[in-house]
Image: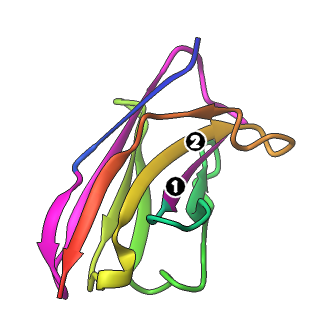
Amino acid sequence: QVQLVESGGGLVRAGGSLRLSCAASGRTFSGYYIGWYRQAPGKEREFVGSIKWSAGSTYYADSVKGRFTISKDYLKDTVFLQMNSLKPEDTAVYYCAAGRISRPTAFWGQGTQVTVSS
């Protein structure tokens, strides 16, 4: 069974940085996409970015391009979300998700809170 565990959230001032981790286990992830999503209070969950596990190709929402970077550690089956130049509007619960392209959000982690103060 696939398990995804996020960590690294916290409180940071605007302009600061945080790095989130998503530790994946339960299967080999060849052919999978590992994505980051976020949900702010009162808003729908939105796509932040993703990485194709095998190829390492990355994709980002326009709102985070140039500020956020997704990377992975093959040996630890962990995906990272490096967030720089954080803004108050980045405040949300951040989730990682995994799945094949036909269903990229088949599995979800429990989420980690990121709060950016102005």
Q: Main secondary structure of the magenta part?
A: strand
State whether residue 28 is above or below residue 80: above
The picture places residue 99, in percent across and down from the top left corner, at: 70, 36
Question: Is 41 contained in the magenta span?
Answer: no
Rendering colour mode: rainbow
Q: Quadrant of the C terminus?
A: bottom left
Is the C-beta separation of discs 1 and 2 under 8 Å?
yes
Left or right: 52 with respect to 42? right
Circle 1 SS class: strand
Q: Which residue is drawn at 60% across and 76% down?
A: 61
Q: Residue at x 40, y 43 (%)?
A: 111
Left or right: 15 with respect to 6? left
Q: Residue 36 carries which label?
A: 1
Question: Is 26 contained in the magenta span?
Answer: yes
Q: Residues within 10 Å of mark 2 (few under 14, many from 20)?
A: many
Q: Quadrant of the N terminus?
A: top right
User: What's the magenta region?
Assistant: 9-38
Circle 2 SS class: strand
CA distance separating discs 1 and 2? 6 Å
Q: Which residue is drawn at 59% across and 85% down?
A: 62
Quarter location, residue 41: bottom left
| Residue picked out by circle 2 | 97
Q: Which mark is residue 55?
A: none
Quarter location, residue 105: top right
The picture places residue 91, in percent across and down from the top left corner, at: 34, 71
